[in-house]
Amino acid sequence: MGDEKKEPLLSVRDLVIHYITDEGTVRAVNGISFDLREGETMGLVGETGAGKTTTALGLMQLVPDPPGKVVSGEIIFQGKNLLDMNKAEKRQYRGRDISMIFQDPMTALNPVMTVGEQIAEVIRIHEKVGVEEADKRAAAMLETVGIPAERADEYPHQFSGGMKQRVVIAIALACNPHMLIADEPTTALDVTIQAQVLRLMKELQEKYQTAMLLITHDLGVVAEICDKVAIMYAGQIVESGSLEEIFDHTCHPYTKGLFGSLPSLSIKVDRLKPIHGLMPDPTDLPPGCPFAPRCSFCKKECEAGLPDSVEVAPGHFVRCILYGTEKKG
């Protein structure tokens, strides 16, 4: 766990990302803020459509433009605002400073290049080394993720799903980046392979002291490898804090709903409690709290304005009227 006194490696402040389409403006990310320190792992949790992947693409400066647009906010990485970078600077920092593991290894790998070539290419681009040195380091990187170096000359189709994801992790870590973004990295894998891949990611992250933003809808995965958690709903972070705070002192009605819909080994229930209703359409968000239409604690004020984010315990923030005053707008 990082030292709270240290300057954050990454500071996201009031980030707003929209997709402007003929059907209307999709308000995908609506003013999110969080910090990530060296060596920390933060889980960004939420349903499909909550804005998690758009947040990751924003951090990587890969939001497709058009239709995507970073409307406002700051992404401060090692003291520099990434949104002020030119195209050449962005290309340099991707892979060298921040790397991303995508959820489907099938689409993340080039089918006509050997896995060794794909790792070596990243090393050559960012480290300015010769072909021989890059190939040697690529083989060593394969060994690091548990694949024999002699398989460097094989193509992606010759690997199983779990092995492909290990290759993707090797590519992401090839230049020893300061930060890793993992977008649902185990979704395409079966459960036993998921556990192996997560264990490997955790070991490598601790070995290299890499900060990691793990995007997932799976609270079990979060419990296994995260230090901090941010719960995302309709483009906003509704609750955030340490793993212990979020799991043991859950505050926001949406977070409570997520835990209530999970099976438990310690508590016997006849039926799980799903969260009723659907997430609002991001082209037509309600004026107040976006969770209000599904919330059993909803009051008139919830529909009138967006609640403030309130610090209910050190480092534990909740955006809910039950914990603070309401703010118009």
Image (cartoon, rainbow, N blue to C red):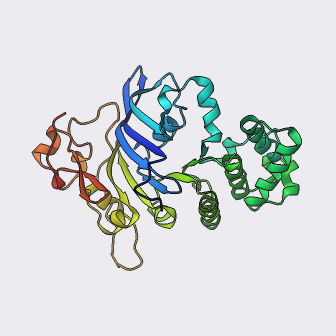
Instruction: Look at the image and tell me in which quarter the C terminus lies.
Output: top left
What's the residue at 85%, 44% (across, down)? Answer: 133
Pick whichever, 142 or 177, lies toward us: 177
Q: Is residue 203 left or right of residue 296?
A: right
Pick whichever, 305 or 126, lies toward us: 126
Q: Decide if residue 235 is in sight here.
A: no
What's the residue at 25%, 54% (across, down)? Answer: 311
What's the residue at 26%, 42% (across, down)? Answer: 290
| In the image, residue 218 above or below residue 292 | below
Name the spot of residue 235 as percent of width and height, x first.
36, 40
| In the image, residue 238 above or below residue 196 | above
Name the spot of residue 49 as percent of width and height, x first.
42, 42
Q: Decide if residue 157 is in sight here.
A: yes
Pick whichever, 216 or 248, lies toward us: 248
Name the spot of residue 212 as percent of width and height, x first.
53, 52
- Give the residue furthest to the left: 300
Where residue 210 sits, quadrant-wise, is bottom right
Name the spot of residue 283 as percent of width and height, x first.
34, 30
